[in-house]
Amino acid sequence: MASYHLAQVNIAYGIETLDHPVMAGFVAELDRLNALADISEGFIWRLQSDEGDATAFKLYDDEKIILNMSVWESIETLKSYVYSGEHLEILKQKKQWFEKTKSAHLVLWWVPAGEIPSIEDVKSKLSLIQKLGPSEQAFNFARAYPAPDSICIESERA
């Protein structure tokens, strides 16, 4: 059993606020996206309100910023969810609803198994990757780092 899991946060900047008609297509897909995550291999946890999604959580004082945070067993299981199947089909439509961001909008980091990241963790990790780029403490898919326990295992084998 892994002693670390992968935390991820993704922020998106909406063309408008969620209650605007231009965002209706995205809002209509939220329940389906969340249900897909919930049943995906490797899924552990996601940030959600009593309504079942994370749109009520505000990272900054901007109503157009949408936050998504979850925990997965591995980078591979998260990638599989993000870049395949129904999620990918919806992801291909993101230009209809979201502006292209100039700074890092996705950050990944390892958490001890059973730990749930906080909103403060999100702010810290986003700040870290935006200032320093990918590192062992905050990284992305393009430049991923292995879980701390896998480094120890590999070192012991050498």
Image: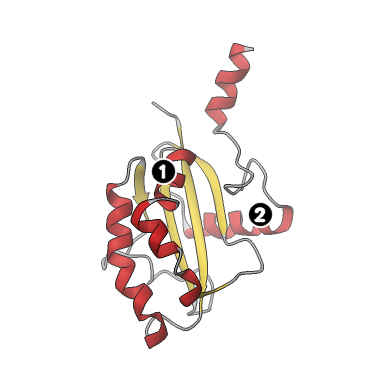
Q: Residue at x 61, y 38 (%)?
A: 145
Left or right of 16 in this view: 46: left
Query: In the rendering, at what x and y percent does residue 112 appear?
Result: 47, 37
Name the residue that disc number 1 marks: 72
Pick the quarter of the image with the N terminus: top left
Whichever of callouts 2 and 1 sits on the residue coming sooner in the sequence is 1
The furthest residue to the top: 157
Q: Residue at x 32, y 69 (%)?
A: 29
Q: Residue at x 62, y 47 (%)?
A: 142
Pick the residue in front: 87 or 31. Answer: 87
Name the residue that disc number 2 marks: 129
Amino acid on which disc 1 is placed: Trp
Whole-angstrom CA distance, mark 2 to mark 1, is: 20 Å
Amino acid on which disc 2 is placed: Ile
Query: In the rendering, at what x and y percent does residue 111 appear?
Result: 49, 41
Pick the residue in front: 22 or 111. Answer: 22
Secondary structure state at the residue bearing disc 1: strand
Left or right of 26 in this view: 15: right
Query: In the rendering, at what x and y percent does residue 32 appear?
Result: 28, 62
Q: Is residue 155 above or below residue 94?
A: above
